[in-house]
């Protein structure tokens, strides 16, 4: 089936992927985007009911997204009742004199001269669109009520007042607390998996060891891709074109790795397995908050994300331990003429 790529090509490919994958993980969601939470703010509705406003809570209970019909004039009030945000046909404006805007640093690029609840508003346009997302303290103001609590449940109600074409209205909802699981159970499971995998197959020369390494690398690659895609599909508040481009890039890199893992043996497999182990550990550490918090901020179920994080940690650690013993024997095998690809299920 042809010769596998040389060492230089493998290293270059790995370096390229190392540069691409972190960008896929952070460019769209942002480096500070939270991974998990114990709190979820849920919108119960807008009273009186209107079709001119759409709202959504983002990142559990951190931010509120609002979209207003271009024909409507919508004004959101701050914590002290002062004008905070204005939506109209020209776009979205923030009152730079709002105490709420200053306290929550909704737009830190804007100075807040003479901030006060009774100061005449000074409107600064933040976008020409008709939707805006901002840090909304009222969503999570009841978080302290969860201190010392061991059970899940609703902590209380929250509300954000607004005006729609001059008529008073209110966005209402509740804040719920989800009690996290014992983190030591998940960490113990990951460590057990890593130790079992790293110690079970000692001689790299064995075809069974190489097949085990290849299968573990395949599983880790699939998990990393699925978790990344789940993060992108979560949306903040929706999935933009850049998000879909990053999903496509993740799939392309994953398919390339899976193809290479199905063909390469000897030195090539060592390099690939080493890269996959580092990538799996990197992604697992990025997702570590899902082990200490109850709700994963992903389009995938929280339990699945938690199990996947543990598996990535175990597979990555086990692969790394396995590969660190392999280079010398793999290089000897490679120099002795083991240049051809060997199927994953092939004989020794």
Image: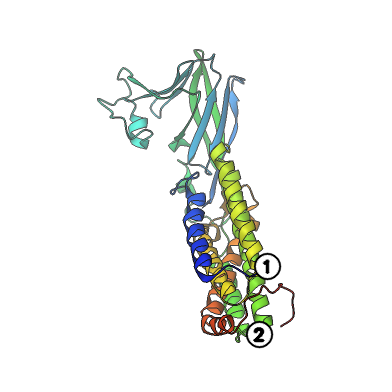
Q: Residue, x 45% and y 35% (percent of image)?
A: 136
Q: Earlier in the sequence, mark 1 or mark 2?
A: 2
Q: Nearer the viewer, residue 67 or 127?
A: 127
Q: How is the image coloured?
A: rainbow
Find residue 151 and name its label. none
- Residue under circle 1? 262
Q: Secondary structure at mark 1?
A: helix
Residue 56: x, y in percent? Answer: 56, 34
**Residue 176 in view here:** no
Residue displayed at 28% across by 28% down: 112
- Residue at figure coordinates x 71%, y 72% from the top left: 343
Q: Which residue is mark 2?
A: 206
Residue at screen point 50% across, 34% down: 64
Q: Compared to 116, does 152 lie above or below?
A: below
As drawn, 265 above or below 294: below
Please identify the quadrant where the N terminus is shown.
Answer: bottom right
Label 1: how many residues lie within 10 Å, few (<14), some (14-19) or many (20+)? some
């Amino acid at each position: 089936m042809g010769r596998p790529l040389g060492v230089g090509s493998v290293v270059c490919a790995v370096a390229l992927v190392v540069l691409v994958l972190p960008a896929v993980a952070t460019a769209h969601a942002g480096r500070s985007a939270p991974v998990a939470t114990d709190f979820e703010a849920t919108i119960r509705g807008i009273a009186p009911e209107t079709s001119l406003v759409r709202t959504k809570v983002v990142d559990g209970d951190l931010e509120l997204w609002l979209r207003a019909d271009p024909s409507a004039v919508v004004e959101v009030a701050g914590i002290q009742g002062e004008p905070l945000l204005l939506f109209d046909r020209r776009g979205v404006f923030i009152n730079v004199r709002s105490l709420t805007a200053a306290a929550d640093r909704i737009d830190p690029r804007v100075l807040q001269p003479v901030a006060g609840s009774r100061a005449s508003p000074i409107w600064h346009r933040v976008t020409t669109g008709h939707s805006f997302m901002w840090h909304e303290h009222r969503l999570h103001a009841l978080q302290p009520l969860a201190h010392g609590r061991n059970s899940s449940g609703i902590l209380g109600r929250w509300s954000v007042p607004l005006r729609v074409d001059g008529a008073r209205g209110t966005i209402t909802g509740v804040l719920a607390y989800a009690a996290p699981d014992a983190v030591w159970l998940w960490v113990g499971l990951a460590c057990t998996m890593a130790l079992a995998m790293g110690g079970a197959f000692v001689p790299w020369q064995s075809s069974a060891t190489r097949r085990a390494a290849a299968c573990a690398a395949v599983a880790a690659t699939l998990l990393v891709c699925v978790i990344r895609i789940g993060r992108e599909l979560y949306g903040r508040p929706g999935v933009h074109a850049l998000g879909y481009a990053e999903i496509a890039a993740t799939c392309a890199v994953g398919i390339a790795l899976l193809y290479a893992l199905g063909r390469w043996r000897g030195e090539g497999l060592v390099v690939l397995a080493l890269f996959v182990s580092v990538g799996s550990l990197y992604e697992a550490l990025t997702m570590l908050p899902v082990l200490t918090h109850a709700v994963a901020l992903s389009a995938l179920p929280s339990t699945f994300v938690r199990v996947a994080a543990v598996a990535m940690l175990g597979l990555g650690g086990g692969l790394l331990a396995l590969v660190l013993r392999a280079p010398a024997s793999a290089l000897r095998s490679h120099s002795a003429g083991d240049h051809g690809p060997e199927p994953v299920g092939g004989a020794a």
